[in-house]
Image (tube, rainbow, N blue to C red):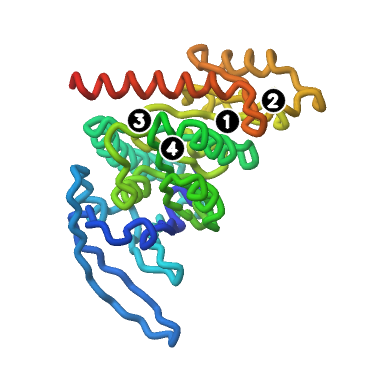
């Protein structure tokens, strides 16, 4: 596990933008540190009062191993900083590293379970989109939102190390989006997603797209409370990616092979790539699409709507 899985920072860029004038739903007190332009530090406390059913009262009371703090940024986001001392300190025993990793993952799983309960109570179909950088995740989401805007309500949580570029692209479709900037972090975790959901407030019965940080390694290990993981693989990346990064493809429910419009210009064997993926995960569903031209996208929409309907039905029966 990399060092930033337990340390580094994350920021919810859209905190003020998405919060706007609606009643907050945190149900806890936030203690923030804010530096103004004169370099003075101000500490202040404010209480959020949301009305929806999502109980994240413990999010700001949790203790990951090591130090924890959060503070406002100049851009209006909130950084949730965590640091675990010693994960990569030379000489640390393997047993100690394994224990720290287990502590991180067990705490993440607890937050993920809470997120999942909220999604199930609200009939929200949450998808965790994972891939390497440049696979076309954001383009896939943008096209999906445009094409399904009259058929399915969709909101988006965007994860990147820096910038709000992808959230801006999503908002241009008319969908609501919030950006999480992870700083040095290489993936989203369930705690970050829980806070973002509190601010975004996806409507009951809607779909929530979570676009993870571009990385085919660490996001495989971190449950966010989603219903499904969707791994997006570009035809420009090579057929052997499922074999090189098996954990990600083993954890996924669907593989979307994107940029099919480039196939005439590439030496890429679609059948071999799918065979590699099924070797890693025999239950993996696969689709070949082009987010640019729309090729194969209706098949993806059919999978999405059918999966959302099944989730909603299970929520009603629960």
- 154 displayed left or right of 232: left
Image position of 56 (left or right of 157): left
Q: Which mark is residue 209?
A: 4
Give residue 230's position: percent from left, percent from top: 49, 28
| For residue 235, above or below residue 21 | above
Task: Out of 1 and 303, give the one closest to the viewer.
Answer: 303
Q: Position of residue 222 (x, y in %)?
A: 42, 37
Give the CA separation, mark 2 to mark 1: 12 Å
Q: Secondary structure at mark 2?
A: helix
- As drawn, 54 above or below 265: below
Tell me which residue sits at (33%, 63%) in the image. Answer: 69
Would residue 250 be visible to someone looking at this image?
no
> Which tag is nearer the camera, tag 2 or tag 1?
2
- Tell me how far mark 4 sits from mark 2, CA to CA: 22 Å
Q: Earlier in the sequence, mark 2 or mark 1?
A: 1
Q: Position of residue 318 (x, y in %)?
A: 18, 22
- Mark 1 vs mark 3, CA separation in Å: 18 Å
- The label number, if any, that marks residue 175 in the structure image: none
SS at mark 3 in the image: strand
- Residue carrying label 1: 232
Q: In the image, what residue occupies the spot 56% across and 18% down?
A: 286
Tell which tag, 1 or 3, sits nearer the viewer. 3
For residue 260, which numbered disc appears in the image?
Answer: 2
Circle 3 sits on which residue? Answer: 125
Q: Nearer the viewer, mark 1 or mark 4?
A: 4
Frontmost residue, 149 versus 102: 149
């Amino acid at each position: 596990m990399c060092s930033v899985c337990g340390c580094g920072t994350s920021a919810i860029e859209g905190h003020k933008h998405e919060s706007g004038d609606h009643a907050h739903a945190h149900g806890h007190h936030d203690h923030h540190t804010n530096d103004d332009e004169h370099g003075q530090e101000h500490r202040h406390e404010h209480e959020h009062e949301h009305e929806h059913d999502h109980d994240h009262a413990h999010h700001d009371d949790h203790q990951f191993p090591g130090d924890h703090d959060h503070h406002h940024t100049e851009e209006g986001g909130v950084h949730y900083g965590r640091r675990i001392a010693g994960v990569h300190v030379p000489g640390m025993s393997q047993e100690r590293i394994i224990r720290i990793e287990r502590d991180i993952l067990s705490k993440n799983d607890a937050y993920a379970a809470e997120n999942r309960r909220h999604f199930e109570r609200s009939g929200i179909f949450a998808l965790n989109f994972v891939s390497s950088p440049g696979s076309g995740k954001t383009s896939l989401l943008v096209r999906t939102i445009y094409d399904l805007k009259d058929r399915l309500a969709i909101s988006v949580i965007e994860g990147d190390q820096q910038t709000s570029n992808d959230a801006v692209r999503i908002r241009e479709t008319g969908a609501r989006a919030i950006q999480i900037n992870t700083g040095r972090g290489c993936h989203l975790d369930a705690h970050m997603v829980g806070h973002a959901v509190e601010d975004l407030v996806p409507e009951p019965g809607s779909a929530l797209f979570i676009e993870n940080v571009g990385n085919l390694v660490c996001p495989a290990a971190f449950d966010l409370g989603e219903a499904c993981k969707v791994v997006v693989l570009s035809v420009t990346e090579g057929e052997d990616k499922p074999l090189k990064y098996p954990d990600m493809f083993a954890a996924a429910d669907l593989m979307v092979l994107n940029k099919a419009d480039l196939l005439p210009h590439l030496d890429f064997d679609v059948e071999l790539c799918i065979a590699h993926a099924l070797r890693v995960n025999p239950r993996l569903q696969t689709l070949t699409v082009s987010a640019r031209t729309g090729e194969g996208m209706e098949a993806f929409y059919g999978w999405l709507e059918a999966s959302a309907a099944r989730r909603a039905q299970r929520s009603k029966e629960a």
